[in-house]
């Protein structure tokens, strides 16, 4: 099957149609998606601002990250579930949307950025944890993350307006 055929198949399922045409469930899923993004991405940007060295310079990076981590992960879990449901309900429209593809590319890049950060510089966090300005690689990971999440949110909102 080609990608477009996969998207067409998803779009034609009963569950996709039911979700898309629901007066109550679709808006609830969409609202939960927005709220979960506000929580998860808001906290990520808060942490990224510390990584960049723009806020909380007097706080160790680990002290900023530790209390927000469970909320960040919970928010992302809900975001992926609700985002998946939104995609499922509008798969064929997503296929034709440049904003959808831009969002997916930026999500992959954000994931790569997170993986590189956690697999490299974060492993040596004890060496720089209390520094007001983390090492260049950590600051760049934070800045790249901020730029990507702003792009992801922007593409997602534009997607919603043009689907």
Image (cartoon, rainbow, N blue to C red):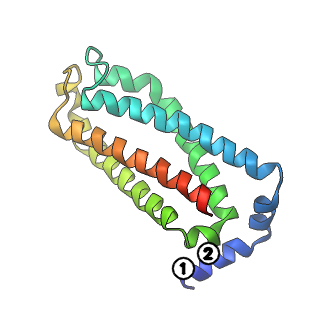
Question: Which residue is labeled 2 in the image?
Answer: 7
Question: Which residue is labeled 1 in the image?
Answer: 3
Tags 1 and 2 touching, CB below 8 Å: yes
Q: CA distance from mark 1 to mark 2?
A: 6 Å
- Please tell me whether residue 44 is drawn above or below residue 153 in the rendered image: above
Viewer-proximal residue, 120 or 13? 13
Residue that lies at the very extreme toward the bottom in this rendered image: 1
Q: In the picture, residue 121 is in which quadrant?
A: top left
**Left or right side of 32 for 59:** left
At label 2, counting other C-alpha atoms closer than 10 Å, the crowd grade (few under 14, some 14-19, many 20 or more) is many
Viewer-proximal residue, 93 or 136? 93
Viewer-proximal residue, 20 or 61? 20
Q: Position of residue 91 (x, y in %)?
A: 63, 68
**Left or right side of 73 for 78:** right
- Please tell me whether residue 25 is drawn above or below residue 32 in the rendered image: below
Mark 2 lies on a secondary structure that is: helix
At label 1, counting other C-alpha atoms closer than 10 Å, the crowd grade (few under 14, some 14-19, many 20 or more) is few
Viewer-proximal residue, 144 or 118? 144
What residue is drawn where x is 61% and y is 56%?
Answer: 160
What residue is drawn where x is 40% and y is 56%?
Answer: 106
Q: Count of labels shown? A: 2
Q: Which mark is residue 95?
A: none
User: Which quarter shows the C terminus?
Assistant: bottom right
**Left or right side of 53 for 45:** right
Q: Position of residue 39 (x, y in %)?
A: 54, 33
Q: Position of residue 120 (x, y in %)?
A: 22, 44
Q: Position of residue 150 (x, y in %)?
A: 42, 45
């Amino acid at each position: 099957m080609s990608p477009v055929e996969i998207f067409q198949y998803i779009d034609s399922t009963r569950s996709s149609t039911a979700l898309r045409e629901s007066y109550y469930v679709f808006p609830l899923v969409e609202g939960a998606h927005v709220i979960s993004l506000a929580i998860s991405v808001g906290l990520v940007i808060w942490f990224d601002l510390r990584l960049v060295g723009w806020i909380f310079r007097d706080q160790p990076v680990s002290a900023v990250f530790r209390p927000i981590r469970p909320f960040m992960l919970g928010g992302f879990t809900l975001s992926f579930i609700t985002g998946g449901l939104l995609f499922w309900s509008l798969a064929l429209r997503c296929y034709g949307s440049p904003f959808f593809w831009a969002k997916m590319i930026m999500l992959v890049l954000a994931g790569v950025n997170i993986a590189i950060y956690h697999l490299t510089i974060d492993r040596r966090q004890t060496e720089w944890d209390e520094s007001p300005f983390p090492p260049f690689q950590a600051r760049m990971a934070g800045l790249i993350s901020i730029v990507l999440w702003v792009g992801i949110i922007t593409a997602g909102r534009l997607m919603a307006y043009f689907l």
